[in-house]
């Protein structure tokens, strides 16, 4: 991994001192350093498009070149503002895009959700006419590439991307950071839900830890996985997939095991409940106030009143968050047959109860089992 103190010194030397984006495991070293040392000049955004907009506003107000960081899977969220706001033919906004390049050259065979994204990452930049360089794990090389990127971005008033392959901006292992703010961990909360919902309930688990914990809980409990949808990619869309299932199969209970950062990323999805009657749909946000899967950087999860937001969107709630196992059980029992879509803000602490290996499974086989379950 690059020396992150040197990375930020180089950025400062090139007039770049404002950072915004969505944390990524491939950029964990960068994101952790920014969090510790940059204070209010590091803004963790709701999604990648949001970050591009914030960066553009910063440039308009200061004429300083900002840096936007993201995983390449988030490039889709950023395409619209990159193509229709920052482009030299529109408002010509210079910025550095630091992009974690997952799936580069088929480098993650057990994670097919990164395969196509990894393949098309350079092409997406090319089709948007955004110049780019591929970083190396070499401090001198980084300094030279950054100088080119910053000079080009500033003189041409265009975004310039730096692609970071695995190991360039992150250590091999991420720390399992824990706290004790709330008594339950995510795995315990998921197990409570499994224990208190009907056995044929359909589950949609959000990207990251929730998918892994649901997967291994099923194995530990000796249960089939045919009722589980694992949203291994497309962060923020687990609830939308679940809603599509719930609307088509009103006789089945459907539960979303969402994350706070994932829910925030596409918060507009909650408003669907203001338009549709879907009494079999339960949306649970497992809220630990963090982007835990990529390093534990803080989200806005603990600052938001998810319950009030959900109520304003048409969900039934218990009027407050559930902070303990007993409160979660009470909330499930009160809401599961209430006759309309329901929502629970389940407060949990950060950290894994045990170290889990990556999940390795046949994605087509898994989704076909769920399709058969829903159509059988």
Image: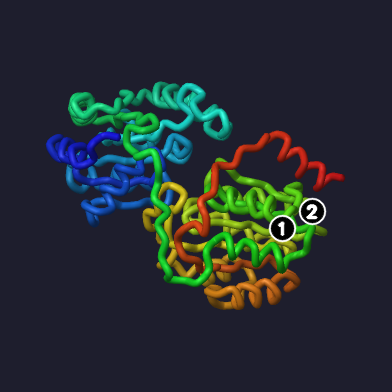
Residue 214 picture location, percent across and down = 63, 53
Split into 4 quadrants, where in the image is the N terminus?
Answer: top left
Q: Is residue 322 left or right of residue 363?
A: left
Q: Earlier in the sequence, mark 2 or mark 1?
A: 2
Asked if residue 301 shows in the view, the reply is: yes
Q: Which residue is more in the foreground, 274 or 139?
A: 139
Residue 56: x percent and y percent?
29, 43
Label for residue 51? Answer: none
Instruction: Please give the residue where the numbered disc 1 appears in the rendered image.
Output: 254
User: Tag 1: Cα neighbours inside 10 Å, few (<14), some, or many (≥20)?
Assistant: many
The residue located at (19%, 44%) in the rendering is 17
Horizontal and vertical percent position of residue 109: 56, 28
Mark 2 to mark 1: distance in Å? 9 Å
- Label 1: state its secondary structure: strand
Helix, strand or loop at disc 2? Answer: loop
Task: Place residue 252 in its image quadrant.
Answer: bottom right
Q: How many marks?
A: 2
Q: From what the image shows, is residue 238 above or below residue 83?
A: below
Rendering coords of residue 116 (x, y %): 54, 27
- Which residue lies at the image location 62% right of the left edge and 61% below the top edge? 190
The residue most toward the right is: 376
Q: Which residue is found at the position 24% from the left and 47% from the top?
A: 58
Which residue is nearer to you in this view: 16 or 228? 228
Residue in front for this viewpoint, 174 or 70: 174
Picture residue at 40% right of the left edge, 21% below the top:
126
Q: Do the CB atoms of the residues marked 2 and 1 lie less than 8 Å apart?
A: yes
Query: Which quadrant of the rendered structure holds the C terminus?
Result: top right
- The residue beneath circle 2 is 249
Q: Is residue 243 visible?
A: no
Q: Is residue 268 left or right of residue 28?
A: right
Kindly indicate the quadrant of the structure image that contains residue 66.
Answer: top left
């Amino acid at each position: 991994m690059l020396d992150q103190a040197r990375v930020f010194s180089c950025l400062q030397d090139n007039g770049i001192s404002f950072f915004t984006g969505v944390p990524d495991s491939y950029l964990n070293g960068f994101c952790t350093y920014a969090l510790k040392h940059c204070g209010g000049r590091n803004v963790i955004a709701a999604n990648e498009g949001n970050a591009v907009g914030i960066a553009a506003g910063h440039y308009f107000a200061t004429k300083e070149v900002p840096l936007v960081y993201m995983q390449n899977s988030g490039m889709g969220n950023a395409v619209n503002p990159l193509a229709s706001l920052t482009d030299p033919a529109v408002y010509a906004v210079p910025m550095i895009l630091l992009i974690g390049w997952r799936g580069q050259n088929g480098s993650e065979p057990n994670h097919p959700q990164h395969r196509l994204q990894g393949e098309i990452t350079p092409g997406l930049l090319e089709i948007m006419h955004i110049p780019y360089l591929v970083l190396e794990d070499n401090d001198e090389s980084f300094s030279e590439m950054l100088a080119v990127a910053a000079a080009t971005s500033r003189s041409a008033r265009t975004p310039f991307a730096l692609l970071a392959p695995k190991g360039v901006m992150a250590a091999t292992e991420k720390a399992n950071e824990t706290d004790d703010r709330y008594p339950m961990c995510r795995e315990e909360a998921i197990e409570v839900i499994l224990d208190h919902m009907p056995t044929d309930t359909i589950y949609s688990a959000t990207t990251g830890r929730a998918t892994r914990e649901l997967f291994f809980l099923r194995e530990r409990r000796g249960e089939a996985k045919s009722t589980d949808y694992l949203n291994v990619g497309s962060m923020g869309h687990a609830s939308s997939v679940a809603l599509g299932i719930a609307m088509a199969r009103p006789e089945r209970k459907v539960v979303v095991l969402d994350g706070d950062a994932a829910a925030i990323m596409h918060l507009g999805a909650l408003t669907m409940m203001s338009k549709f009657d879907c009494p079999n749909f339960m949306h649970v946000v497992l809220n630990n106030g963090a982007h835990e899967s990529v390093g534990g950087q803080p989200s806005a999860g603990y600052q938001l009143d998810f319950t009030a937001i959900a109520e304003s969107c048409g969900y039934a709630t218990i009027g407050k968050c559930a902070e303990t196992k007993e409160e979660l059980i009470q909330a499930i029992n009160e809401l599961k047959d209430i006759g309309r879509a329901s929502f629970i803000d389940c407060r949990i602490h950060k950290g894994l109860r045990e170290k889990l290996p990556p999940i390795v499974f046949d994605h087509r086989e898994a989704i076909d089992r769920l399709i058969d379950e829903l159509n059988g």
